[in-house]
Amino acid sequence: MTNNGDIKDARWQSDLATFTTTPAAVIQNSLEEFVRGFSPQQSDAWRESILFLQSEVAEFLPRQPGAGSYGIVLEYKLPYDGRRPDVIVLTSGAVVVIEFKGKEVPSQADLDQVAAYARDLKAYHRECQDRDVYPVLVPTKTKNSVREKDGVTVASPDRLGGIFA
C-alpha cells in the first residue's frame, strides 16, 4: 500500500487534493459499484462519511504543506479475510485507519474493530510494517471531541482534519 499506484482491492483511491475536488456522488457511485449487495443504510453512511471527510480535508490541506499528495483509500479489502476499513489515509510515514459509526457513543466492539484493522495492516501488509499505523473511530453523532480510548483515537467528524498532521 503506497501513496502511488493502483490498489486492486479498493474501490476509491486518490490523493487528498483530488478527493476534495471530486463530486461526492462520483465517489459514492464508485463504492456502490464495488460492494455488492450494499444496503440503503450503507449507502447513507457512505454519503455522510464522504461529505465529512471532504469538508475536513479541505480545511486541513492549506495548513499542512504537501498534504495534498497524501493518499486516501476507501473500502480497502484487507488481505486474507475480506473485511473493509472505511478509510485509510496514507500520510508521510504513517497510515491512519478510520472507521465511521453512526452513533454518539461507540461500543467496545467498535473500538476493537478499528484496532484490529490497524493491527492487521501493520502485521500482514508488507508496506505498512515500517510505518506507524493509527486506528481512528468516528462516531458521527458527536461534535467537537477528540480523545483516546484503548489505543484508539475517537474523534468527532468535525475534528478529523487535526488527526492527519
Image (cartoon, rainbow, N blue to C red):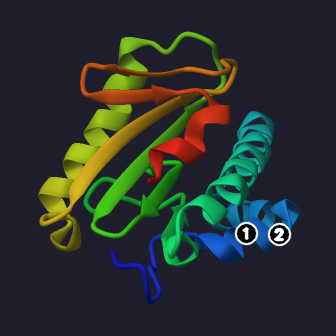
Q: Name the residue under label 2.
A: 26
Q: Residue at x 53, y 48 (%)?
A: 86
Q: Name the residue under label 1.
A: 30
Left or right: 145 with respect to 33?
left
Residue 151's place in the image compared with 46, above or below, is above
The quadrant in which residue 35 appears is bottom right
Amino acid on which disc 2 is placed = Val
Confirm or deny contact between disc 1 and disc 2 (CB under 8 A): yes
Residue 163 appears in the rendering: yes
Q: Which numbered tag is attached to residue 102?
A: none
Task: Give the class, few, some or many, for how many residues have Cα within 10 Å of label 1's Cα (few <14, many ≥20).
Answer: some
Query: x, y (%) of residue 5?
Result: 44, 89
Q: Which residue lies furthest to the bottom in this view?
A: 5
Q: Residue at x 27, y 38 (%)?
A: 116
Residue 76's place in the image compared with 99, above or below, is below
Query: x, y (%) of residue 117?
Result: 31, 45
Residue 72's place in the image compared with 82, above or below, is below
Viewer-side residue, 78 vs 67: 67
Query: x, y (%) of residue 79?
Result: 29, 63
Residue 83 appears in the rendering: no
Query: x, y (%) of residue 159?
Result: 60, 34
Amino acid on which disc 1 is placed = Ser
Q: Is mark 2 on a helix, strand or loop?
A: helix
Q: Residue at x 49, y 15 (%)?
A: 106
Q: What element carries label 1?
A: helix
Viewer-side residue, 46 vs 16: 16
